[in-house]
Structures are given as C-alpha cells and as structure tokens.
Image: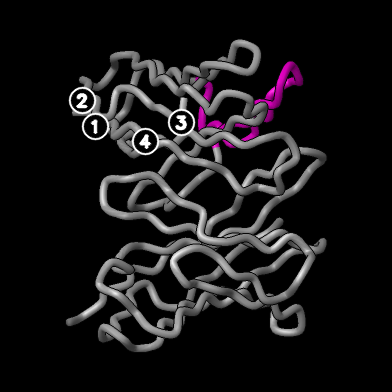
Amino acid sequence: AQSVTQLGSHVSVSEGALVLLRCNYSSSVPPYLFWYVQYPNQGLQLLLKYTSAATLVKGINGFEAEFKKSETSFHLTKPSAHMSDAAEYFCAVSDRGGSNYKLTFGKGTLLTVNP
Amino acid sequence: GAGVSQSPSNKVTEKGKDVELRCDPISGHTALYWYRQSLGQGLEFLIYFQGNSAPDKSGLPSDRFSAERTGESVSTLTIQRTQQEDSAVYLCASSPWSDGGGYTFGSGTRLTVV
C-alpha cells in the first residue's frame, strides 16, 4: 500500500518569503507524485505532477517540486510567496493499476501568507 | 463542458433518506473518479470508472453507497439510508485515459446529514 505524509498541517510565511511544503511518500513501485491546491469552497486544482521524467518539476503559479528517490520526498517550493497563495495544499501518490490512477492523498497543509 | 460540473453544490438531508449526487465530466475524458473529503478522514478514494470496463469499487465504505456511469458521460453517486457520518464533501474528477493521474476536479457537493 502507498502512503503520503505531509509534515506540518499549518505553515505560515510572510509575503515575499520562501514557501516550503514537505511531502514524503512510501511506495513499493516507482511512483507518480502530485501536488494539488484547494482554495476555500472549491475543488482541487493540479499544481504539478511527477511521472518519471525530469526530477525537478515546474508547475503553475511559480511552484516547483523535486523528486528525491533516496529521501522518498517530493517537497513543494516557491521562491516568493504571494497573498493569493494562501490555500490548502495536498500531496498525492498514484496507486497505478493498469490505467487506474487512483490517488492516495496526504492530510494537507494549510498555507497562510502574512502581509 | 469546460470543466467538471457537480450538482447539487450543497445538500442537506435527514438521516435515513437517500441522496443522489451528479457529476458531468469534461467531454472526452474517459476516466472518472469519486472522492470523499471529510475533516476526520481527509481525502478518500471511492470509485473509478474507465469507459466500459468494470468499475473499481474498492473505496466504497459500505453497501449503502453505489455509483453508476453511462458510457463516458454523466455519473451518479447514490447514498442510501444516509447516516451522520456520511456528511462530507463529495468530489468528482475526470481525466483523459492514461493521463498519469492529473485529474480535473469539480467543485464538489457538500452533503450534510441532520
């Protein structure tokens, strides 16, 4: 079975500061990894995904994540936080069986951006 | 349509009643997923449809839950004899076949059982 651990249920940063959201996974097979963002009262939006190509993945809104197999990590970063980045962020791993890419999600990290 | 559409957006029902939730996926997306999001359990997989293949129902929490999909179009999730623990946000997502899990999610249906 696959699992995802997000370290820190709540992260607070100042506007303009570095954003670092941590994600560690466990998987018995090479994983597909994802970061999703959820704004209040909305569904989840895909930020970026790793599917075994380049280990540094760039996503939307200036976010990027690096796949580190040795550390089983897929941390999400952004050099400079904006107020509009305040949301909940979910890391997920794909449990791929054939064409079924059902996801196992972490518990989420709520990002607060202070002016 | 341009996105995944879910209806209703909010549903309040009495304990013991049946409810039906609807999902309209993006046209051409053959894969459709249902997830449940609750405070206690986070995001949980419920069911997966892919074309005319047998659905993966492994995430359905009890036999009170069922789902159908007609071809590659609309899906309905039905909860019979609702219980208070069914209160959650039910999210639908779709993707092209073999897209590696990068779904497009709908905005969800918030179900409250009173």
Of circles 2 and 4, the one toward us is 4
Going by the numbered disc 3, the residue's amino acid type is Ala
Please, which chain is the residue tagged with disc 1 on? B
**Residue to which mark 4 is pinned:** B108
Which x, y percent locates residue A58? 59, 70
Of circles 3 and 1, the one toward us is 3
Of circles 3 and 2, the one toward us is 3
Mark positioned earlier in the residue sequence (3 or 2)? 3
Going by the numbered disc 1, the residue's amino acid type is Thr
Which x, y percent locates residue A61? 44, 66
Helix, strand, or loop for circle 3? Answer: loop
**Cα distance, mark 2 to mark 4?**
14 Å
Q: Which mark is residue B12?
A: 2
Point 72% across, 39% down: residue: A100
Going by the numbered disc 4, the residue's amino acid type is Gly
Q: Is residue B58 magenta?
A: yes
Point 80% across, 63% down: residue: A30
Name the residue nearer the viewer: A61 or B101.
A61
Do callouts 3 and 1 mark residues in contact (Cβ within 8 Å)? no
Q: Residues within 10 Å of mark 2 (few under 14, many from 20)?
A: few
Magenta stretch bounds: B46-63
**Residue to which mark 1 is pinned:** B112
**Is B39 placed left or right of B60 in the picture?**
left
Do callouts 2 and 1 mark residues in contact (Cβ within 8 Å)? yes
**Cα distance, mark 3 to mark 2?**
27 Å
Mark positioned earlier in the residue sequence (3 or 1)? 3
